[in-house]
Amino acid sequence: MTGIIVALPKIENAKSLKNLLVRNGFTVIAACSSGAQALSLADGLNDGIVISAYRLPDMLYEELFDCLPKGFEMLLLASQSLLLECGGNDIMCLGMPLKVHDLLNTVEMMATS
């Protein structure tokens, strides 16, 4: 199963999302609150999924995506207005507020592809 890293600015939100994914059968490597932490965790893995907010304390999602090792995919969680700016790249996007069903289906699709 593909390992997942959750990177959100508020660690409490990252941990809540991690717990939700684990309860639904996904392998979550860690929850973190910065892009640097996510990159450090991703460095030791061959592939996986990073679930990221639009803005982290130390970088925007684009910088994080550009620095990820090959084999990693990104799921961006952002407001609908911000998602309009994010088209044209290889990043999956989900609008906020999140619908749990949409999140689980999207992560499942990414993990099996």
Image (cartoon, grey):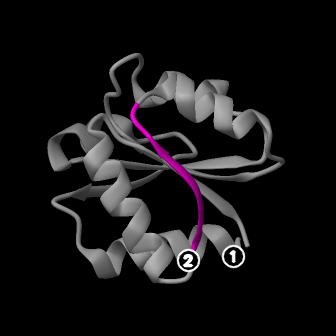
Please tell me which residue is depicted at 47% across the width and 83% down the height of the picture. 24
User: Between 38 and 103, which is closer to the camera in this rendering?
Assistant: 38
Q: Give the residue furthest to the top.
A: 58
Alpha carbon distance from label 2 to label 1: 6 Å
In x, y percent, where is residue 92?
Answer: 48, 54
In x, y percent, where is residue 28?
Answer: 57, 62
Please tell me which residue is depicted at 63% across the width and 30% down the height of the picture. 39
Please tell me which residue is depicted at 55% across the width and 77% down the height of the picture. 108
Q: Main secondary structure of the magenta part?
A: strand
The reply to whether the magenta stretch includes residue 71 is no
Please tell me which residue is depicted at 45% across the width and 72% down the height of the picture. 21
In x, y percent, where is residue 4?
Answer: 59, 57
Q: Along the horizontal axis of the image, is 46 left or right of 100?
A: right
| Location of the N terminus (image quadrant) | bottom right
Q: Residue 94 appears in which quarter of the rendering?
A: bottom left
Proximity of marks 2 and 1: CB atoms separated by less than 8 Å: yes
- The relative height of residue 104 versus residue 27 in the rendered view (above or below) is below
Q: Which residues are magenta?
A: 26-33
Find residue 33 and name its label.
Answer: none
Query: Within 10 angstroms of label 2, few (less than 14), some, or many (20 or more) residues?
Result: some
- The relative height of residue 67 versus residue 95 in the rendered view (above or below) is above
| Location of the C terminus (image quadrant) | bottom right
Q: Along the horizontal axis of the image, is 83 left or right of 79?
A: right
In x, y percent, where is residue 63?
Answer: 52, 21
Looking at the rendered structure, the secondary structure element under dot 1 is helix
Residue, disc 1: 112
User: Please, what is the three-letter code of the amino acid marked with disc 1?
Assistant: Thr
Residue, disc 2: 108
User: Please, what is the three-letter code of the amino acid marked with disc 2?
Assistant: Glu
Q: Along the horizontal axis of the image, is 90 left or right of 1?
A: left
Q: Give the residue furthest to the right.
A: 46
